[in-house]
Image (cartoon, rainbow, N blue to C red):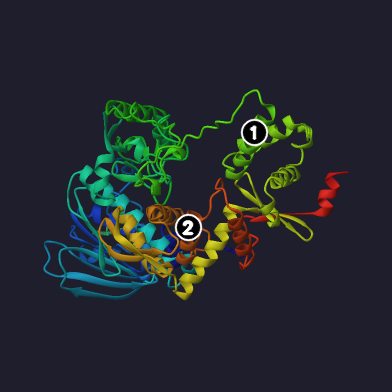
Amino acid sequence: MADIIQLLPDHVANQIAAGEVVQRPASVVKELLENAIDAGADTIKLIIKNAGKTLVQVIDNGKGMSTTDARLSFERHATSKIKSAEDLFQLNTKGFRGEALASIAAIAHVELKTKQASDDVGNAIVIEGSTIVSQDVVVTPTGTSVSVKNLFFNIPARRNFLKSDTVELRHVIDEFHRVALAHPSISFALYNNGSESFNLPITNYRQRIVNVFGNKTNEKLVPVEEDTEVLHISGFVGKPEFAKKTRGEQFFFVNNRFIKSAYLNHAIASAFDGLLKTGMHASYFLNLTVDPQTIDINIHPTKTEIKFDDEHTLYAILRAAVKHSLGQFNIAPVLDFERDPNLDTPYNYKENTPSFPKVEVDRAFNPFNETASSVKQTTAYKSSGNSGNSSSSWESLYVGLESKGNVSQDDFGEVEFESEEQTLSIFDEDNQVEQSHTTYQIHNKYIVSTIKSGMLIIDQYRAHQRVLYEEFLKNMTTREGVSQQLLFPLQLHFSPQDIVIIEQLKADLEHTGFVFLEIAEELVEITGVPVGVPESEVSIILEQLISDVENEVPDSNFSATDLLAKSMAKSLAIKTGQSLQKDEQEHLVNKLFACKEPNVSPANRVTFVTMSVDELDKKFI
Ligand code: ADP
Ligand code: MG
């Protein structure tokens, strides 16, 4: 049989390599920034358009390339950084595989301009899909500029796979942060669609963190410093009280390279043991310096994973170092995490002057008069049923019934819904007026209503989310959200990267009824909010929204409008545990069934279940 194996042409091999190296615009950002650092630049500019889909450009003032090098840089396995395999274990550069530029040029339109300090003129090369289009002599400053346009122009499938601009921009900014945080001695700037998003001057590490994450970060940082034979650790951890629900601000750098390590992350988490509420994540910015011989970086093309020779020791040292810092800065004892947030004064009560509690004395009360006391007892049950604040008040209803000897405890318990119905109807006997109503709230969580075929049980939180979600979506698409003017503008502080997200969503937020007076570097000033949104909730809504955008699951279909509507619905919906008046219950039921998709919440969870009389009958067999 004839031989069938053949070598792939270079452009095909490059496209395949690109599949590993370039997943999205942010990967290009990472590779170009790293090349600029390797070239010894101390000023690096990143320019992007449409979240990098249309353009990623990096301009540096590094050492530039000669004419031949400029041409060679686009070849596969062409690198100036290593010469032999041994060099892999003495790495002082970010790059070494020599495949980034070749891969990028295989799937985009690339323009390179570069000049060395010793030359008067430089070189410009245009290359599209691995084909050199032109190579010219140009006048250009010392250093290198690489523009990558129309990413994945020749691979539509990959292009379609890209997420919305908001999500891709988020990835770009993440990558920019990682590189900028690892190199405070280099100045970085980021321009997004023509406007400056970040301008980070040369500074020290602490100040760099503050410049990236906002002035308020400064007070949150606790320094960590540890020097051992195998490892040097320096950097900061965030104080526990500033822990976040998202893992956003967690940065490990090993020899100035951002890496991901679940194992070392665990070391830090365990140092915070007992200091954080469940589900909260401490922030950290830690630089580990180790002997390059003791690590292997070449285990993944993106180089974000590293193999350490002795991970166990690193774990132990890291954990101890962080613990030590937290202890030294007296973080542990002052905190009280057991505090029940339910005991906090609600926002809208804060300004009210407290009134004296009323003391009512029943002067006619006679402990020896039995009838009088039993009457008292019934009213007490009734009022607890009315306010319905906790499940214990429901239980007290049963206690009352039992002591009256009307119903035995055994009749309850087994079938939840029926028993609730029972209680409610008994409750209604006390109050004839309410009997006309057809909805009941149970456990401040579900609304029960009778329907022709039986009964309906609605989850109030999910149902209300559905109602609000459809309302917000409608307002945003028809752009007619009604705004309510605030008496005084509301000033809210955010970190610069949160501001980027708010700016992205500004138009949509305005359609729901938000009015922004100003969106500055770390400050948002709001003069109007959507009707029905309490002023005290605004910062919570925006924070939730930012965290939702950050946590956007990469595979779900992302739309900013949709996400905003979902997030606001989630923040503003009537929560589980909130007691509702009869008319509120009915209103919610009616609104739910006026929705386009009443069956599911915006997160695709069931909003109600029905139980037919037949099903009920079966339970009584
Ligand atoms: P690697 O960084 O792994 O060496 P790349 O494909 O990223 O591979 O780059 C190939 C070569 O091109 C580098 O080794 C370097 O010599 C040169 N090069 C790339 N970008 C720059 C730059 N911004 N300034 C100077 N030289 C560069
Ligand atoms: Mg490189």
Residue kind at label 1, given as amino acid type: Gln
Seen at 57% across and 51% down, the residue is 580
- For marks 2 and 1, the one nearer the N-term is 1
Q: Residue at x 70, y 53 (%)?
A: 435
Q: Quadrant of the N terminus?
A: bottom right
Q: CA distance from mark 2 to mark 1?
A: 45 Å
Task: State the residue in front, 101 or 271.
Answer: 271
Q: Residue furthest top?
A: 368
Mark 1 Cα shell of 10 Å, populated few (<14), some (14-19), many (≥20): few
Residue 72 sits in quarter: bottom left
Which SS class for mark 1?
Answer: helix
Asked whether residue 78 is in view, the answer is no
Q: Is residue 543 visible?
A: yes
Residue behind mark 2: 567
Left or right: 392 in relation to 453: left
Residue to which mark 1 is pinned: 377
Instruction: Tell me: is circle 1 under 8 Å from ligand 2.
Output: no
| Residue 21 image position (x, y, % from top left) | 41, 57
Q: Give the quadrant of ligand 1.
A: bottom left
Q: Nearer the viewer, mark 2 or mark 1?
A: 1
Q: Which mark is residue 462?
A: none
Query: Which residue is more in the foreground, 409 or 9?
Result: 409
Vertical placement of 317 versus 297: above or below? Answer: above
Q: Quadrant of the C terminus?
A: top right
Q: Is residue 416 placed above or below 475 in the rendered structure?
A: above
The residue furthest right is 621
